[in-house]
């Protein structure tokens, strides 16, 4: 554009201001949605990102982005009890500790720290296990769950499973989740410790004999003219 065209077009306003110098209001309805209250849209987007799909119960779902370092939510007695319970659910085997001995309680505690609802569920469940363990020895000296025999521990856990099924289901889910994601467990069962994608799951070679019966079937459709 030449100087004559520029003079004919008139003055050009600086960015963000009108030609008379006043501040230009922000655009509305032009493709970019302004956040009327700072942080509201970001919070909503974060809430949507935390949505977890799947058939499992809500109590069995681990929060997606739980930080590695979270405040402790269990005291020493609760932590010891949870470790003993995990070791009974997934006992030690030759050359490998149980779920509790492999640090399952610490992993589960980080999950509890990120989920108040799950934390309350486990607090109530651990109290029920503690009370059921102590009730077995009345009026004898009270023993904790870790001091019971394996058969007595199984009896206590079965009673708690009946009384608090939601807690027990979440307990088993998280016990297995913490145990079977350990590299040492993968090595023991012969599982490759890697994400399933992009390489995919390992599948046996295809057996063409599986289709022999289907190939022998006569056509079950009509040929069109």
Image (cartoon, rainbow, N blue to C red):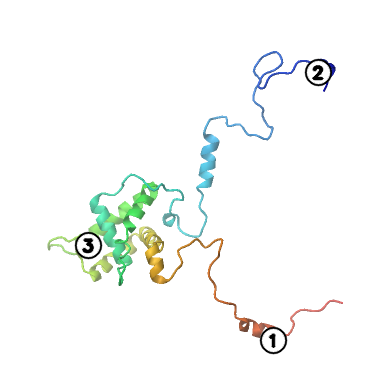
Q: Which residue: 69% across, 86% down?
A: 216
Q: Is residue 31 left or right of residue 128?
A: right
Q: How far apart are marks 1 and 2 (CA)?
A: 83 Å
In the picture, measured across the screen, residue 182 lies left or right of residue 56, that is left
Q: Position of residue 204 (x, y in %)?
A: 54, 76
Quickly name the residue at label 1: 216
Residue 30's quadrant in the figure? top right
For label 2, count other residues whose C-alpha is less than 10 Å away and answer few (under 14), some (14-19) or many (20+): few
| SS state under label 3 | helix
Residue at the right extreme of this rendering:
225
Q: How crowded is mark 1: few (under 14 residues within 10 Å), some or many (20 or more)?
A: few
Number of numbered discs: 3
Residue under the point 74% across and 18% down: 12
Going from the N terminus, do you reach mark 3 or mark 1 first?
3
Q: Which of 190 and 18 is in front in this view?
A: 190
The circle drawn on residue 146 is: 3
Q: Which of marks 2 and 3 is nearer the N terminus?
A: 2
Check the image and report above or below for 15 versus 135: above
Indicate the quadrant containing the C terminus: top left, top right, bottom left or bottom right.
bottom right
Which numbered disc, 2 or 3, marks the residue closer to the eye? 2
Question: How much space separates mark 3 and mark 1, taking CA atoms?
Answer: 62 Å
Q: Residue 191 location, x and y as percent? A: 44, 68
Image quadrant where one finds the N terminus:
top right
Q: Is 209 placed left or right of 6 in the picture?
A: left
Secondary structure state at the residue bearing disc 2: helix
- The mark lying in front, picked from 1 and 2, is 2
CB contact under 8 Å: marks 3 and 1: no
Residue 177: percent from left, percent from top: 40, 61
Q: Which sits in the foreground, 175 or 204? A: 204
Residue 107 in the image: state x and y as whole percent: 36, 54
Q: Is residue 64 left or right of residue 167?
A: right
The residue identified by callout 2 is 6
């Amino acid at each position: 554009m030449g100087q004559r065209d520029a003079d004919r077009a008139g003055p050009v306003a600086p960015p963000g201001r009108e030609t008379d110098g006043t501040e230009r209001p922000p655009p509305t309805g032009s493709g970019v949605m302004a956040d009327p209250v700072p942080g509201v849209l970001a919070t909503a987007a974060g809430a949507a990102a935390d949505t977890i799909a799947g058939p499992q119960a809500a109590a069995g779902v681990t929060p997606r982005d739980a930080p590695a370092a979270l405040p402790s939510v269990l005291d020493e007695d609760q932590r010891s009890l949870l470790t003993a319970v995990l070791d009974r659910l997934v006992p030690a085997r030759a050359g490998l500790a149980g779920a509790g001995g492999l640090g399952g309680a610490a992993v589960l505690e980080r999950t509890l720290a990120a989920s108040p609802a799950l934390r309350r569920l486990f607090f109530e469940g651990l109290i029920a296990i503690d009370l059921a363990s102590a009730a077995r020895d009345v009026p004898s000296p009270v023993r904790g769950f870790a001091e019971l025999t394996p058969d007595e521990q199984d009896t206590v856990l079965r009673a708690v499973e009946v009384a608090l099924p939601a807690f027990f289901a979440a307990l088993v889910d998280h016990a297995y989740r913490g145990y079977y994601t350990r590299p040492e467990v993968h090595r023991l069962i012969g599982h490759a410790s890697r994400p399933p994608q992009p390489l995919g799951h390992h599948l046996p070679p295809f057996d063409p004999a599986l289709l022999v019966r289907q190939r022998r079937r006569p056509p079950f459709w009509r040929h069109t003219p």
